[in-house]
Image: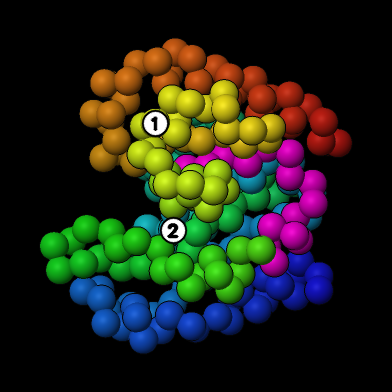
Amino acid sequence: MSLAALTEEILACRLCAGRFAATATAHAPRPVPWLSETAPILVCGQAPGARVHALGRPFDDPSGDRLRDWLGVDRAAFYDRRLFAVLPMAFCFPGYDAKGSDLPPPPLCAETWRARALAAMPAVRLTLLIGGHAQRWHLGRARPVSEAVRDWRAAGPGLLPLPHPSWRNTAWLKRNPWFEAELVPELRARVARLLETVPA
């Protein structure tokens, strides 16, 4: 199946319609796939937030601004599908619970689509694992995010675990200055090297 056909299937997915209707937000599914056959860098996050659900573009929010700063790229580069693909653990906004907190990504989404989407993106050379859900899937075991990120050198070739760039993690960043002192420069260097390999 072509990537275009797979994307159309994902866009039409309504497997979680009942689940989303039962949340505090009572919203309808709106998958936000951002896949690429040629991008060398894959961003694996958790799930779209409410703003991304409304706009239909991944990381088009303050979290995305912080992520792009970590990567050392501007919006034009980040949204160039020759360069970056985005594959969250769930393609749709999961909604909020009664207390206004983000619900976790429904496992059904990854079980249904993830293997097919990964197989359709053969050019990926660097996979960024943002948050615990993506880290568990790709690293094969559950670990606290802080532990997985601190142990980033052991993640394996082509994998780099990161904390979520949400404003909620600002306190974590202040408590862990090594992240911006050690890991962010490594991240920027890897990204820059890969982007140099993509024809203009």
Q: Secondary structure at mark 1?
A: helix
Q: Locate residue 188, reporting x and y percent.
A: 59, 23
Residue 29 quadrant: bottom left
Discs 1/2, front: 1
Q: In the rendered image, which quarter contains the N terminus?
A: bottom right
Magenta residues, start to end: 116-130
Q: Which residue is mark 1?
A: 147
Which quadrant of the structure image shows residue 164?
A: top left
Tell me: residue 134, above or below residue 40: below
| SS at circle 2 | loop
CA distance for labels 1 and 2 = 21 Å
Residue nearer the viewer, 46 or 111: 111
Q: Is residue 63 magenta?
A: no
Instruction: Identify the disc placed on residue 47.
Output: 2
Is residue 173 visible in the rendered image? The answer is: yes
Does residue 59 appear in this view? no
Q: Is residue 173 left or right of residue 61?
A: left
Characterize the local packing of mark 2: few (<14), some (14-19) or many (20 or more) Cα atoms within 10 angstroms.
many
On-image quarter of the C terminus = top right
The residue shown at (52%, 27%) is: 152
